[in-house]
Amino acid sequence: MKRIHRGTSEPDLYGAGSPNKGEPFYLSIGRLGKPHGLDGGIVFYIITDFPERLKVGRKVFIGDEHIPAHINSVKEHSRGLIFHFKEFDQIDQVERFKSDFVFVDATELPKLPEGEYYHHQLIGVQVFDNQDNKIGEIQEILETGANDVYLIKNEDQKEILYPALLNLIEKIDIENRVMVVKPLEYYNQD
């Protein structure tokens, strides 16, 4: 699951859809590991689908406090990357960030092709079957390897797992926060 944060003091680990107006919105791109070397380098474990965007000069936000920093250098490492930050160039400065997540501002995300969506865009979407029966709301997206699975909670707070397969999804309307899907044979609404 991609880690999502709103710009509040309380972390929102799984997100709740779009942020309130004017509220900063951050998406995790990875996690920092141990310092590397004596010159302020730190190991970075990638979780973004766009690692090619992790370039020198890129502004990121570190930890739950969203401390702004700029990538000063990027080197490949057997376990991910080694980052050096412009603002933090000594081992004792980066040591405090060990195990912190690194975020980007959601407004800086690359535009996706038509019909593709970021996970945070789907959290909170209301799901209906093609007979206009409400199934529930997407609470989480599970990454299984073969395909994603939507964890949908119905009005009774029952969790329903629905495979995120193109042949089962008839319509996604992000603007109106609605998804229409084909009913599953094994899904019983009673």
Image (cartoon, rainbow, N blue to C red):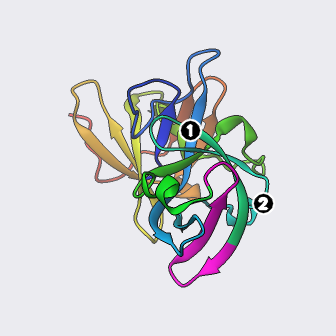
| Residue at 70%, 69% in the rendered image | 74
Q: Is mark 1 on a helix, strand or loop?
A: strand
Most extreme residue toward the bottom, as rendered?
A: 78
- Above or below residue 153? Residue 148 is below
Mark 1, Cα crowd under 10 Å, few <14 / some 14-19 / many 20+, is: few
Range of the magenta residues?
A: 75-88
Q: Which of 81 and 16 is in front in this view?
A: 81
Real-space CA distance between mark 2 and mark 1, rounded to the nearest whole angstrom:
17 Å
| Residue at 47%, 57% in the rendered image | 92
Mark 2, Cα crowd under 10 Å, few <14 / some 14-19 / many 20+, is: some
Amino acid on which disc 1 is placed: Ile
Q: Does the magenta stretch include residue 84?
A: yes
- Above or below residue 162? Residue 132 is above
Most extreme residue toward the top, as rendered?
A: 21
Q: Which quadrant of the view contains residue 61? A: top right
Majority secondary structure of magenta residues: strand
Amino acid on which disc 2 is placed: Val
Q: What element carries label 2?
A: loop
Residue 54 in view of the camera:
no
Residue that mark 2 sits on? 56
Q: Is residue 58 left or right of residue 141?
A: right
User: Mark 2 or mark 1: which comes first in sequence?
Assistant: 2
x then y, percent, for residue 1: 43, 53
Residue that mark 1 sits on? 67
